[in-house]
Image: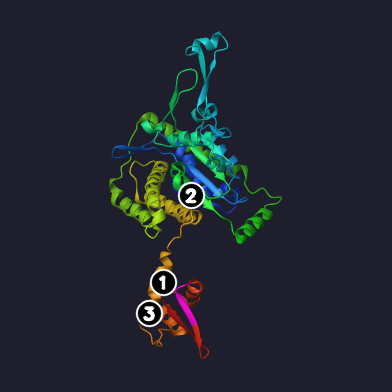
Amino acid sequence: MNIDDVLEQWTDVFCEYSYNNERYAQLCLHLVLGQIYKNRFIIKGSQRIDGRINIAAFWDASGGKSAPYGFVRDMLMSAGKDVRDLDDFTDAALIGTWRQAEDADEEDEAEGGLILEPGIMQLADVIHFDEASTLFMETQHTKKAINFLEKALNPIGSAHNLISKKLASGPAIEFHSDLSLYLTTYIPENIGQEFLNKGLMQRTLVLPKRLNFAQRVDNLRTDVDKLGRQTVTPEQYEAVRSTIVTLHRQEVLRQNEEYYDLDWDPTREFVKNRAVRLLMMTEKLDAGVQSVATSLIARYTNFMYVIAMHSACIGGRRIVTKSDVEYAYEFIRTIMEHVLPWLEMDSGITRKDAKNEKLRNQLRKISQKLESSEDGYVLKSKLWETAENELKISQPTLYRQTKDADWMSETTKGRRKYVLIE
């Protein structure tokens, strides 16, 4: 079995619930795989990274973010996972509470006459929250909830993962959490600033999405095409379930037989290269967001390691291969391409467009070699012709990439167009 085949099978069914959302399908698959492999750790010096992946889909309304939840929940439950919806932020609901024993049987199990009623964070393997924007509303309960959830997402079994709460009566409730988060919501106002300021979002792989008109039209047409047709057969659905169950059973057997660490030595230099490439994505960011974005990269690099581990585990390999790392890198890079512009836009921070700046410098250098007027203008057609030959970019593409550029001035002289690259 390999990750590409598992992903293809999963995506074919997932996208019948959430149209044209292949990247979201991949995100949800690794939520499930993260629960299957959560007790497998990546050793990184004195640190341990567990196999969980926490996800968030922050989209416009009617984008398909909630539609696949039933499918994902069913697959998690097939792997023996407890999935619960979060709808109460009180300490009792999250952490638990003590109550008086009510009969002789409970008295035997009671601690000082008290019975523990565990909260959702002790009971659930996956917590789903469909209106996650509520978490960003500043209330006494949400502040506590975020603090508890941040601890829950720290490496399983670590000191930072220990959740402890002293209640008004009874002993303190303490436990280590191994839950994963599955958050969905519309894009709340100022959510980018929340992302920059809250550790919860940095512990989560976030897929932001704003639908344009063309995408809405495409989704609507797809929806109409499915009228009166059953596009997911029971055989397809059960085939996905069978794959998830098989992966879960294989992991249980491996853990019963032996525990082993992954071997990263054959791909260590390749991993370094891909990690640096992720960091370079923040190079052109405005200074106001760059420091936070680089710390975000540290988290997302860890996610890359975990996803590479998922790929290796599916293949039954102890040695992490280049294909495992490349698969994980491409996935995380794509997520970062969604997240970074969205962060800056919603945080009121402008990003420098590296690609645009590169084209500007290239065109300026070419224009300096051409015959120009006293004020520096060159014939536009000649500039486009030369640039097409030297840069291997078609003239229509050059037009599209420069039509709104504020660094190119255009004028007409004797019915001929001239441009100045500033």
Looking at the image, residue 116 sits to the left or right of residue 358; the answer is right
Say which quadrant the N terminus sits in. Answer: top left
Give residue 157's position: percent from left, percent from top.
38, 31
**In the rendered image, the vertical position of residue 333 relative to residue 69, given as above or below:** below
Which residue occupies the foreground of this view, 310 or 213? Answer: 213
| Most distant residue in the top direction | 104
Q: Are marks 1 and 2 in contact (CB under 8 Å)?
A: no
Q: CA distance from mark 1 to mark 2?
A: 31 Å
Q: Is residue 420 visible?
A: yes
Instruction: Return the residue at label 3.
Output: 366
Which residue is identified by label 1? Answer: 359
Give neighbour class at mark 1: few <14, some 14-19, many 20+ (Cα, 10 Å).
Answer: some
**Three-letter amino acid code at the position of disc 2:** Gln
In the image, residue 409 lies in the stretch drawn in magenta: yes
- Image position of 83 (left or right of 368): right
Of label 1 and label 2, which has the lower sequence position? 2
Cβ–Cβ under 8 Å for marks 3 and 2: no
Question: What amino acid is at disc 1?
Answer: Leu
At which x and y percent is residue 218?
Answer: 62, 59
**Element carrying mark 1:** helix
* Mark 2, residue position: 193
Choose top left, top right, bottom left or bottom right for residue 330: bottom left
Q: Please report the residue visible at 62 percent of the width from the left and 50 percent of the height from the top.
A: 61
Q: Which residues are magenta?
A: 405-410
Residue 7 is at least partly visible in this image: no
Viewer-side label of 3, 2: 2
Crowding at dot 2, Cα within 10 Å, few <14 / some 14-19 / many 20+, comes out as some
Q: Say which label, 3 or 2, has the lower sequence index.
A: 2
Disc 3 to disc 2, C-alpha distance: 41 Å
Select label 1 or label 2 by which is in front: 2
Q: Residue at x 49, y 50 (%)?
A: 192
- For the residue labelled by badge 3, is the local secondary structure a helix, a strand or a loop? helix
